[in-house]
Amino acid sequence: MNPQTFEALLKTEHFREITDVDRPAGYQLGEHVHPFDACALVTDGQITLVVAGVSTTYAAGEVFRLAAGTPHLECAGPHGVIYRVGRRAAAAS
């Protein structure tokens, strides 16, 4: 997916906060959760997410999503990762 299409998608899905994240090679973050829904497009490098014991690696051009409150681990690929991410307040339950 290209960045223009991705940003249009974020707007249609009501992601109001959009930012770029840059993590260096060797970056790792243990299990944690976010209080927001996230939808991200990897623009350079790779990121691996581990959710419920399942490890998935995303590379440039791929999109990943995490619902608010989803426990996950993350680590950057061997050359780091840059991604554009939309954040949206979690739906009230």
Image (cartoon, grey):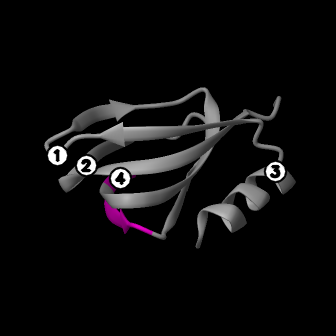
Q: Amino acid at mark 4?
A: Leu
Marks 1/4: CA–CA distance:
15 Å
Residue 21 placement, left or right of 29: right
Marks 3 & 2, CB-CB < 8 Å contact: no
Marks 1/3: CA–CA distance:
30 Å
Marks 3/2: CA–CA distance:
27 Å
Q: Dot 2 lies on which element? A: strand
Q: Which residue is mark 4?
A: 49
Marks 2/1: CA–CA distance:
6 Å
Q: Residue at x 86, y 55 (%)?
A: 12
Q: Label for residue 36?
A: none
Q: Residue at x 52, y 40 (%)?
A: 70
Over which residues does the magenta segment extend? 48-60
Q: Earlier in the sequence, mark 2 or mark 4?
A: 4
| Badge nearest the viewer, 4 or 3 | 3
Q: Amino acid at mark 3?
A: Lys
Q: Earlier in the sequence, mark 2 or mark 1?
A: 1
Marks 1 & 4, CB-CB < 8 Å contact: no
Marks 2 & 1, CB-CB < 8 Å contact: yes
Q: Amino acid at mark 2?
A: Ala
Q: Residue at x 57, y 34 (%)?
A: 69
Q: Which residue is mark 3?
A: 11
Q: Dot 1 lies on which element? A: loop
Q: Residue at x 38, y 49 (%)?
A: 82
Quadrant in the picture for the N terminus: bottom right
Q: Dot 4 lies on which element? A: strand
